[in-house]
Amino acid sequence: MNDHSEPGHGHSPAAWIAVTIMLVGFTIGTIAFFFEIAWVVWASAGLVLFGWILGGVLAKMGYGVKGPRYMSKART
């Protein structure tokens, strides 16, 4: 399929950075929850929130799928 209206499914620097930060936050939070370290769980929740906000900021700066600074890779 060669649909040029495809939104990109998050293949952008903004999405990759946001998801990576949030995955790190979820991983640390899960391990801290297992070991019952409450303050690290809450700090990890803050890290997840930070990743979400950073993704939005980067998208608004043009690094999202339809942003002017995003360069799509040619797919064959």
Image (cartoon, helix red, strand yellow):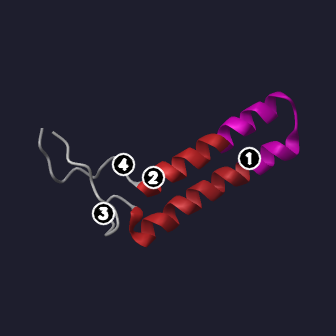
For the residue labelled by badge 1, is the local secondary structure a helix, a strand or a loop? helix
The vertical placement of 26 against 10, above or below, is: above
Residue 47 percent coordinates (x, y): 69, 52
Quadrant holding the C terminus? top left
Instruction: Give the structural element (helix, strand or loop) at label 3.
Output: loop
Residue 70 vs residue 44: left or right? left
> What residue is pinned by disc 2?
15
Q: Which residue is mark 4?
A: 11
Q: Position of residue 42 (x, y in %)?
A: 79, 48
Q: Residues within 10 Å of mark 4 (few under 14, many from 20)?
A: some
Please name the predominant secondary structure of the magenta segment in the image: helix
| Circle 1: residue type | Ser
Task: Kindly check if marks 1 and 3 are in contact, taking CB atoms under 8 A apart as contact.
Answer: no
Report the residue at 35% width, 67% height from top.
Answer: 69
Query: Which quarter shows the N terminus?
Result: top left
Residue 5 x/y as whole percent: 18, 54
- Which residues are the magenta region? 25-44
Q: Residue at x 67, y 44 (%)?
A: 25
Q: Residue 43 at what x, y percent from top left?
A: 78, 50
Q: Which residue is mark 1?
A: 44
